[in-house]
Image: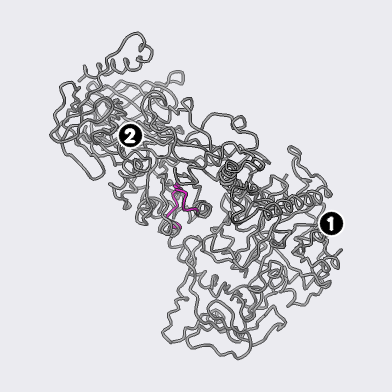
Amino acid sequence: MRAIVANFLAISLAIALTPALASDLRQPVPGVHALVDVRIVTAPGQVIESGTVVIRDGVIEAVGANVQPPADARVHEFERAEGQDPITVFPGLIEPYLLFEIERDLDEETPAGRHELINPDRRIHARDWPEDKVTQLRRAGFTTALLAADQGILRGHGLIANLGEGNLNRNLIKPSFGQFASLSGRAQGRQFPNSLMGAVALFRQTLDDARWQAAARTAWENNPAQPRPEWLEGLDDLAPALTGQTPLVFESQDLLDTLRILELISDDQVDLTLIGHGEEYKRLGALEARPVRHILPLAFPDAPDVKDEDDRNVSLEALRHWHRAPDNPARLAEAGVPLLLTSHGLSQPGQIFEQLAKAIERGLDSDQALAALTTEPAAWLGLSDRAGRIRPGFMANLVIVEGELFTEGPSISEVWVDGERHVLAALQPPAIDPAGTWALTLGLGGMGDVDASLVLRGPPTNMEGTLTVMGNDTPLSEVRVSGERVIASIDASRFGGSGSISIRLDIDGDRARGNGSGPFGEFTVRGRRTGGPDEEL
Amino acid sequence: MIRQMTLSLTLLATGLAFASDDWTPDIEAWNSSAPPRPDNLIVRNATIWTGTDEGILENADLLVRRGRISAVGQDLSAPRGAVEIDGEGLHITPGIIDAHSHAAMIGGVNEASRISTADVRVRDVIDAESINIYRQLAGGVTTINLLHGSANAIGGQMSVIKLRWGASPAKLVFDAAPEGIKFALGENPKQSNWRADEPRYPQTRHGVEQIIREKFQQADDYRQAMDNMPTGRTARDRVPPRPNHELQAISEILRSERDVHSHAYRADEKLALMRIAEQYNFVIKAFHHVLEGYKIAPQMAAHGVGGSTFIDWWAFKYEAIDGIGFNPALMHESGVVTGLHSDNPELARRMNLEAAKAVRYGQVDPHDALKMITAWPADQLGIGHRTGRLAEGLDADFVIWNGHPLSVQSRVEQTWVDGRRYFDRQADQRMRERLDAERAELIALVLDDSDNDNGNDNGDNGADTSEPERRRVHSFAAHLTGYRASELDHDEYCIFHDH
């Protein structure tokens, strides 16, 4: 196994160097893989309990219970100890709304005569590739996304890409999909529009301008003996969305914004898709009457702080929403609203699983949830023949999970994009039992040392634990034992950062040594076991 | 207590299922169902302030059929099965009409950018979830005119709504109301009290007058171009004029298809605007605030413009220095259709006291004083044929008071809109008890939930809680409770300045 990992590293290195060497040396990179003896969820509700997936040059070649690995394939076996969850292969998840900021000067981009918030002709270029977001999504199991830029009222064309290593050139699937809009755009200071109603007026005028331009230009083409109409640059790019050739993807800010957008876009020709806000359940009747496709975020609110009886400054409105928000996806599904799910609105895409678990507990069908992250977005994006399922001829986009995917904290070990393997955690069967209480010292470099206490509970195949730093008990969001190593992660927001803090500890008897990293930087960890699992209780 | 008991609805035993006694509103609009509408309803033996020439009727009955008033008078006979309210000792008035409000708008009250924002519509930003709607029902208000702010000589299009608590924005809109638009004169449009960072034309009162003329001329040209566009077969392959929502709205004014409601304090600028209107052959529908109306009341009456004013708010800025409490009385005596407005969501809950002050300042007849918050603002808004009075055929928008409506000791017991009892003091009491119970239940759930979570009660659920950057929040309202943050994100109220 260790040899395989080393081998993999060498291959990865070779891939990374390929462009530089391409003109000099051809690097033979094996592109044929077989994942054997794995549980395969080929599509929502379709499971092969034990089978093989064969990948050739980025495309799935064969899937099935009785598929033999081809002779030229690298065979990937996953050792499992007794009692460990099976390794399951899922189709790569599709993020239908990867919103990101394009670092460009809107003033410079806007042609004369057009408002700077109106950019229907904007396109995402290779230089805009949001690598950090792509990496985060991939680590959460997403392999394909619809990318959109987030500034302005009309925001331009989206783009569909896989979420592999490298740049847009390697990952592009469709250079143009959808037209993106939001009424949240405002001009600075005293410029128009500086109110919501001004933004609506600007949007409405722009749509009419675009319709006028189409009619006026046609009339002039047919009949040149009249004054030529002025040309409004960029508005021709609205035509596909206004005629239903591509969706108009409208980000709704809140309950009333949804009603507003439904009124504003009453033209049947327009293929309207709404980015939801999480309060759809409040006036569901409007959506039952007009079941517009929704891309639904799962950012359920935190529990309001009610600990202090004498100082409960919490509104009934907030309490109610906290209680009912996780019902929202199931309620929308019941109402017959076509649903896609998104990690948009979460501080980390990986948090989608914890939220999904809540939504499923409140009645969202788990197969429907998986469909809303795989087959449904694939169909919407026009990728039903190549994404969203594990099927021959489809892109080799896979998520490999230890156990189930839809749990609060799934153990995603590998994500494959276009047949390229991304190892998140090279898992080996546990070779040690680290349960007990550990006294640790975190070495923060120039900031000195901090004492911490780590408690690990449960069998090595299914552990949980708590880290105590400076009197602050923090549950580990994830802890796994791989060989002689403990890999744990903690939500960094508990320490005021974003993302997560990860800790790796190599265990030698009762001694531990390792390191960690997080948003605040790297640190070292050392310590020893001070109590067994029983004493901890 | 006895009064409360006499007030409770009597359900006649005819098998008519009128579940009104159980109907309870909710503190959140989306969660509040419309109260039932009885087919027939009669209020008996009340003191009825009709708002019409009939005056105040003692021991009178009000008969309502399917949401409309079918009769007002003595000893009326009601159909079998009618819901009956014993009005002994109670006063009934028309629902209060507030001709100048910003109480249920979201995302900014003012598009405070261009000198003309006629393309902007309040209709797009009606805040159906605003608690102001429910609170104003509790003060007897049934219809309000949501106006754009006053930073622009020609402001946005207004929206008249009925306070149907719980309804969606579209269902709040009072469809009988004619189209209207906000104008503003004086310090606000000419930027007297603005930071000097981004000066905008105009900076003077005569500049404001001039820009309005200029916009009228542009709009007239635009409309002519639109009208000259051939239709039918000859229109084929002709380049149409480019649509312009701003000029379209302004051109509707010139054709008397859109009423002008103009914010104005000083007499001179009001005279100037009336002269422009007369030149373009239309009538200004109403001046708002109109603190110097008493100086030019005969001229206003001759033009036919209404006056919608504060009774005792003045001197909050220089152009408001010449206000007097007798202004409504003097305008009224000169024949101006006079109303009292709130321009403020808190004042709107006690408009009856504003009317009472008109009796105090100028000895306005009490019934006429009441008309200043009912019949006459309805006329100013062009909805007098539907609401604002208690007469046959009008919408059943009325208020049941437990005493004389102009008394500080009286309060609203019930407020009916379209023949539905949207506010009822007893239902409100039921709601409070229910909400207290629900709140306790939810708090217990939160505590239970955090107990199950390893004592980790303030965990991050992953929601990105970073608040969107808010441009500016007015401090005057920040201390008020019950306002959502988004409601405070407005710009230029007509009377306030913080810059």
Q: Position of residue A267 (x, y in %)?
A: 50, 53
**Mark 2 or mark 1, whichever is nearer to me:** 1
Residue A320 appears in the picture as rendered: yes
Where residue B72 sits, quadrant-wise, is bottom right
Distance, label 2 to label 1, CA atoms, is 68 Å
Disc 1 crowd, CA 10 A, few/some/many (<14, 14-19, 20+): some
Q: Nearer the viewer, residue B178 or A519?
A: B178
Q: Is residue A299 above or below residue B235?
A: above
Residue A534 appears in the picture as rendered: no
Residue drawn at x 48%, y 44% is A241
Q: Is residue A284 above or below residue B2?
A: above
Secondary structure beneath label 2: loop
Reading the image, the residue beneath label 1 is B272
Residue B136 is left or right of residue A465, and the answer is right
Identify the magenta region.
Answer: A267-283
Q: Is residue B14 above or below residue B24?
A: below
Disc 2 crowd, CA 10 A, few/some/many (<14, 14-19, 20+): many
Reading the image, the residue beneath label 2 is A141
Which quadrant, please, contains the C terminus of chain A? top left
Kind of residue sitting beneath label 2: Gly
Mark 2 vs mark 1: tell me if same chain: no
Q: Which residue of the protein is positioned furthest toward the top in this rendering?
A: A24
Residue B423 included in the magenta stretch of the image: no
Residue drawn at x 54%, y 29% is A103
